[in-house]
Structures are given as structure tokens and as C-alpha cells.
Image (cartoon, rainbow, N blue to C red):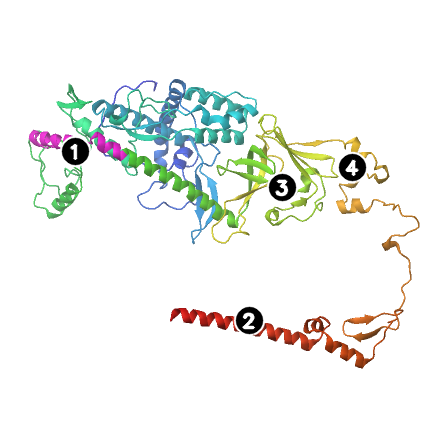
């Protein structure tokens, strides 16, 4: 019935896989699909993913079904009894997968899909880690390395609490069980985008899990794991990629090798423990020469000697190379009793001390934080590199309102960012169709908004933020002069945005992705959004005093631009008998008698010079002018002389500076 663990056994084994599969292959088998994708490329050597043998599919499905049933029961038990918090990303792209071209540039990005088979394997590993943690702590209470997760501070859930209250839900984060129930209720009531937001906020609000040495923990400090909902936990299942798992393997092997060994706890002598030796494996042992064509003679447990060619150089050299590469914890149960006792004594001496293990844990925690930070920065960099040449349209959830825009969360890329609806000067820049205006309305957008298709600038529009302190009642309204509609944003509205990367103002570093509003509604449209266009009548006070300038905006706006509407308004001047300039009907007359006495000085017809000058008088008058005045009058020689003098002065100053520098060097 898979309800109770019947027995446990620890030992060294050789795992023989009948089929090394990927998660996708196992998922397909569970759902009665073809295990392999058609025309898929073969995997690299010594990796999972080779084509599945058709004759094994039936047996594989039976085993996978049993493991899936077991994982569901284990998960349900952790959630119901331990209060485990489900923080799986689901549709949220907490981990992104990039596809690179031949030059190493990202050409495709998508969140990694989470299948049930992922949770199945995770549950089995959690179960193994929990059992190993209890075992090593039982034998080494002062020198075990565990993985703990402290409870989160309620104050860190402030943003999550505000958004849940804005959606009409209550929040309880006093315990991990109450937090899990709150998130489950939110998942049932909200759509997938909003649920991804709540999961992300809960994850970011929690404290970080840490490696600890049990001997360095203060009294009263628990060793439980808050997120997983279990009393004791360690990392045991991945020694090929984590040093903490290697240390746990050493501790587990040391606990299994102990026989009539006394240990000390807290400085005082503890009770005497008697443990059975690690069971002898029934699998073949390469170290013992089993299965080799020319294996040497090996002493068995009963003292007999098996047949084999001892003088075979190939087999002997092969075994020597294997034995030299093994660790000091290598167990050989086929040697005599004296060698076993001597090995046990050496293993006990090699176990970790409390101070040494504490230092290791501190270093592991620091390296783990650095690795996570590096991973996040790399993901951000590759996103910017991708959006430098690509643009994507996706869903986003509004999490906060500002005077000039909104703050949104993008579930697909697990990122937050601003969406501006106004520039620094306060000019609203949006797509006119949001307010049912013609696409030609307004003015061309500024440089920062030019990448948005159809965006226009409205200098006379107003962007008003109401009830900013109350998340449940807060809203951002955009009103455009001449429009009978307004655009309203509220928290938790699901909208559609465009993600791109603006490189116009960048000289060195690639900027983060830029978000822009492209649709007032959700792209998927699973649930209705609160983002609405509300019709309002024009204020009566604004219509008073403008009876003579009435325009039927309801009929005119859809087919005419703002310029055409304003041009159609008849303007009646208050000047009596004075026509406007563009209404003048004077006949054009030819100008006669135009004379050019000096260059740049023109006399039009009808002008009488009171003191006419002859050509000689004009020449004498020009000589009396200064060089600058002559140049202003258009004298070419004067202009050239001024330029030569200016150039000469610049050259003299440059020569003086060179001479000064040369003198200082001497």
C-alpha cells in the first residue's frame, strides 16, 4: 500500500540500469506516448537519452507507475503533516534554458518545463536524504553536516500580504503549514500568471537554507527544514557535484563501519554503541576481479582461493590501478578479520572534527551564495543578449503603481521591471488605440518610446495616481484631452507587454531588458482583467462658455485626427472690420525702382533717401568704417583679414605652449 517503510538497508552497490532515460522519455512512457521524439539526434556517449528498447517499455511503465504513486504519497504526507510549502515554479520561468548559435549568442530562450516525473525523482531523493540525515546524526551528533532551513520572518511577507489582500484574500504566514494553505487557496482562485507571482514572492521572502555542523549549533535551535516540512535533512544523493554530499558519504560509511566504538558528546563520555558491519554486497566487485577474463586469485571470506591467473600482467596491472585510485574508505569485505579491524581504526581517525566541519560548512554556504548570485547575473546577461536582437510579447502582472508608470512581474522570465507610460517631462506616451483614438493622434514618440509600434506622445494628457497607500483601492488613471475615455490600471491586473533591449544610449555595458505596454488585456485571456476603459461624460463646467465651439467628438474622433478636429472649429475674431492676415485680398503689386547702392543694402520702390551719396562719397565712407563693420557689410577683404589675424594668434599661443613644455623637460 506504500504507506509505511518496512525496512532500511545501507550498503555499497553497483547500479545496473536497463535503460538510462531522460525525464521527457520517462514522462512519455507514463502517458502512453512514444518514448523518443521523431528525428531526434542521438545523445553524446555515456549520457542518458538513447532510444528506448521497445521490449522494455511495458516493464518500465510498471516501475515508473509504482514510483509515481509512492512519490505522491510522500509529497502528500509532507504537506499534510509537516506543512511543506509548494514553491515549484510551474509556468514561472525560475530556470531558463537558452539555445545558442555557433558564435555562442542566444537565439532562443524558454523556461524549463516541470513534469510530474521531476517531482517523483525529487521526492525519492528527499526521502533518501532524510533517512541518511537521521542515521549520521544518531552516530555523530557533534560532527554531522545537515541542511537546515529556518522559519521565515513574517515581516518579510509584507509585499505578498498586500497583494493577497488586494485580491480579496487573507494571509497567514505564522507557520509553514498556514503559508502553504494560503498559497493553495490563492492558486485555486487566481489565474496562472497571478499564482506565479505569489509563488515568486513567497520564495524571495524566505530565508536561505544553510549547511550546519550539528556540534556548533546552540541549544534550542532546531535542525528542521522549513520549506520541505521534515525534521532532519541533509544532502546525500549528489556526491558527483557537491562537496557536502561527499562529507555525508564519509560520515555514513563511518557510521556503518563502527563496531564496539565509543564516541564522545559534549565533552563527556557517551554510551557504548554496537553496530553491525556493512552488509556484503551480492553484486560483482571489479576491485575483487569479478567478471574479468583473467582475474587473479582472491581470498574469499571462508579462506578459500578462487581460480585465476595471478601471473597475468594485464589483469594484475588493471586491478592495481583501480586499487590505487580508491579512497581510504574503500571497503573490502573479502579480506581477513585482522585487516578489517585495522581498517576500521583508520576510518574512525579520519572522521571530521567539529571545528573542521564548521569551517567547511561556512565555506560551503559562502560558495553556494556566490554560485546562486553568479547564476542570476548570467541569466540576466543572457536575457539582455537575447533581447538585443529579439523582441517578445508576453504576459505580465501589475504589482505596484507609480506616478509615471507601473511595476510588473513577468512570469515567463521570472523578472520584475517598470513599464513607463510617461517620460521624464510628464508627457504621456501610449498607443492611441487604448483609448479608441486614431493611430495618427498625438505627436511622434520620443527616442525612449520609439521602439513601441504605434506609440504616440500626448503632451496634454494627465497621469493621476489615486490611493497610493491602499493597495486594494489604488489605481492609476490616464486622461487625454479631447477623449471621453480613460485608461485605468490596478494591482494584479494581467496585461500584455513587449520585452526588448534598447541599445540607443549604451556605449559599453548591455542594459537590462526594457518592458513596454502593448495591450491593455491579457494575452491568454483566461480570466477577465480589471484593466478597463471606463466611459465618462465631459464635465459640465468645462462645456460652459464654449457653446460656440461645440464639436461632435463622439462622431469625429474615430475618423479624424486631433489636428483635423481643431482645424474644423470656426474662429470668430473680436476685431471689427479687420480681416485676418490669411484672409487678406490685397492684390500683389510689382515693386519698381529697386536700387542696390551697397552690398547688403537694398532700397525698394517708394523709398526716398534724404541724403543721397555719390559713389566717391560711398567709398570714403567705407574707409572710415572699422574692420569688423566692413566685414558685417559684406566686405570680402575685411573678412579674410580678420580670419588671418585670428589664425595667427592661435598659432602664436600654440607655439608659446610648446616652448614652455620643452623648457620644463630640460
Seen at 30% across and 20% down, the residue is 220
Q: Residues under labels 2 and 4: Cα distance? A: 67 Å
Establish if 167 lies above or below 295: above
Q: Quadrant of residue 553?
A: top right
Residue with the mark numbered 4: 554
Label 2 environment density (alpha carbons within 10 Å; few <14, some 14–19, many ≥20): few
Establish if 149 lies above or below 444: above
Q: Residues under labels 3 and 2: Cα distance? A: 48 Å
Residue with the mark numbered 1: 350
Q: Earlier in the sequence, mark 3 or mark 2?
A: 3
In which quadrant of the rendered image does the C terminus lie? bottom left
Q: Earlier in the sequence, mark 1 or mark 2?
A: 1
Establish if 166 lies above or below 366: above
Q: Residue 89: x percent and y percent?
A: 45, 32
Q: Residue 586: x percent and y percent?
A: 91, 60
Q: Which mark is residue 422?
A: 3
User: Magenta segment: does it hold 336?
Assistant: yes
Q: Earlier in the sequence, mark 2 or mark 4?
A: 4
Give yes or no for contact between labels 3 and 1 (Cβ–Cβ under 8 Å).
no
Viewer-side label of 4, 3: 3
Which element type, helix, strand or loop, lies under badge 4?
Answer: helix
Which element type, helix, strand or loop, lies under badge 2?
Answer: helix
Label 1 environment density (alpha carbons within 10 Å; few <14, some 14–19, many ≥20): few
Give yes or no for contact between labels 1 and 2 (Cβ–Cβ under 8 Å).
no
Q: Which mark is residue 58?
A: none
Q: Residue furthest right?
A: 577
Extent of the magenta region: 335-360
Amino acid at each position: 500500500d506504500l504507506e509505511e517503510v518496512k525496512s532500511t538497508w545501507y550498503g555499497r552497490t553497483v547500479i545496473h540500469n536497463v535503460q538510462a532515460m531522460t525525464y521527457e522519455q520517462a514522462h512519455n512512457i507514463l502517458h502512453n506516448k512514444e518514448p523518443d521524439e521523431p528525428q531526434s539526434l542521438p545523445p553524446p556517449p555515456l549520457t542518458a537519452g538513447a532510444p528506448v528498447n521497445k521490449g522494455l517499455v511495458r516493464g518500465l511503465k510498471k516501475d515508473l507507475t509504482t514510483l509515481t504513486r509512492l512519490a505522491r504519497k510522500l509529497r502528500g504526507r509532507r504537506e499534510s503533516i509537516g506543512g511543506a510549502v509548494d514553491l515549484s515554479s510551474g509556468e514561472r520561468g525560475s530556470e531558463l534554458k537558452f539555445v545558442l548559435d555557433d558564435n555562442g549568442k542566444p537565439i532562443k530562450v524558454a523556461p524549463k518545463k516541470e513534469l510530474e516525473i521531476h517531482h517523483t525523482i525529487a521526492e525519492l531523493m528527499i526521502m533518501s536524504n532524510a533517512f541518511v540525515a537521521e542515521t549520521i546524526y544518531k552516530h555523530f551528533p557533534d560532527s554531522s553536516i545537515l541542511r537546515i532551513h529556518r522559519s521565515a520572518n513574517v515581516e518579510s511577507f509584507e509585499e505578498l500580504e498586500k497583494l493577497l489582500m488586494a485580491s480579496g484574500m487573507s494571509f497567514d504566514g505564522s507557520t509553514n503549514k498556514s503559508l502553504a494553505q494560503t498559497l493553495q487557496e490563492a492558486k485555486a482562485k487566481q489565474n496562472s500568471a497571478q499564482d506565479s507571482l505569489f509563488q515568486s514572492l513567497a520564495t524571495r521572502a524566505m530565508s536561505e537554507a544553510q549547511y550546519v555542523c550539528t556540534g556548533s549549533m546552540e541549544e534550542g535551535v532546531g535542525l528542521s527544514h522549513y520549506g520541505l516540512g521534515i525534521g532532519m535533512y541533509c544532502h546525500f544523493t549528489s556526491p558527483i557535484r557537491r562537496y557536502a554530499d561527499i562529507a555525508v558519504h564519509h560520515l555514513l560509511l563511518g557510521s556503518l563501519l563502527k563496531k564496539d566504538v565509543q564516541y564522545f558528546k559534549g565533552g563527556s563520555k557517551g554510551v557504548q554503541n554496537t553496530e553491525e558491519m556493512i552488509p556484503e554486497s551480492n553484486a560483482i566487485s571489479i576491485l575483487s576481479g569479478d567478471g574479468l577474463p583473467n582475474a587473479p586469485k582472491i581470498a574469499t571470506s571462508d579462506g578459500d582461493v578462487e581460480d585465476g591467473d595471478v601471473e597475468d600482467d594485464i589483469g594484475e596491472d588493471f586491478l592495481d590501478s583501480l586499487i590505487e585510485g580508491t579512497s581510504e574508505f574503500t571497503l573490502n569485505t573479502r579480506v581477513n578479520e585482522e585487516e578489517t579491524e585495522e581498517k576500521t581504526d583508520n576510518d574512525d581517525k579520519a572522521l571530521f572534527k567539529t571545528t573542521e566541519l564548521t569551517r567547511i560548512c561556512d565555506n560551503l554556504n559562502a560558495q553556494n551564495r556566490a554560485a546562486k548570485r553568479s547564476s542570476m547575473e548570467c541569466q540576466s546577461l543572457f536575457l539582455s543578449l537575447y533581447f538585443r536582437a529579439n523582441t517578445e510579447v508576453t504576459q505580465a502582472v501589475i504589482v505596484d503603481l507609480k506616478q509615471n508608470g507601473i511595476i510588473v512581474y513577468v512570469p515567463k522570465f521570472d523578472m520584475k521591471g517598470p513599464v513607463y507610460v510617461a517620460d521624464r517631462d510628464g508627457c504621456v506616451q501610449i498607443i492611441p488605440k487604448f483609448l479608441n483614438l486614431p493611430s495618427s493622434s498625438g505627436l511622434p514618440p520620443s527616442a525612449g518610446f520609439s521602439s513601441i509600434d504605434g506609440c504616440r506622445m500626448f503632451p496634454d494628457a494627465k497621469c493621476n495616481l489615486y490611493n497610493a497607500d491602499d493597495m486594494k483601492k489604488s489605481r492609476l488613471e490616464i486622461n487625454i484631452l479631447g477623449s471621453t475615455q480613460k485608461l485605468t490600471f490596478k494591482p494584479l491586473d494581467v496585461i500584455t507587454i513587449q520585452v526588448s533591449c534598447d541599445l540607443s544610449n549604451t556605449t559599453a555595458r548591455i542594459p537590462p531588458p526594457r518592458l513596454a505596454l502593448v495591450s491593455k488585456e491579457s494575452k491568454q485571456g483566461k480570466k477577465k482583467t480589471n484593466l478597463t476603459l471606463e466611459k465618462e461624460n465631459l464635465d459640465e463646467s468645462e462645456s460652459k462658455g464654449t457653446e460656440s465651439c461645440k464639436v461632435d467628438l463622439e462622431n469625429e474622433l474615430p475618423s479624424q485626427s486631433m489636428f483635423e478636429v481643431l482645424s474644423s472649429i470656426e474662429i470668430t475674431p473680436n476685431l471689427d472690420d479687420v480681416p485676418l492676415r490669411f484672409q487678406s485680398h490685397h492684390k500683389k503689386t510689382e515693386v519698381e525702382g529697386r536700387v542696390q547702392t551697397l552690398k547688403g543694402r537694398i532700397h525698394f520702390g517708394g523709398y526716398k533717401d534724404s541724403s543721397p551719396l555719390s559713389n566717391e562719397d560711398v567709398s570714403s565712407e567705407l574707409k572710415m568704417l572699422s574692420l569688423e563693420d566692413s566685414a558685417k557689410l559684406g566686405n570680402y577683404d575685411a573678412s579674410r583679414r580678420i580670419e588671418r589675424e585670428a589664425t595667427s594668434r592661435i598659432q602664436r599661443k600654440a607655439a608659446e605652449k610648446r616652448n614652455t613644455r620643452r623648457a620644463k623637460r630640460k
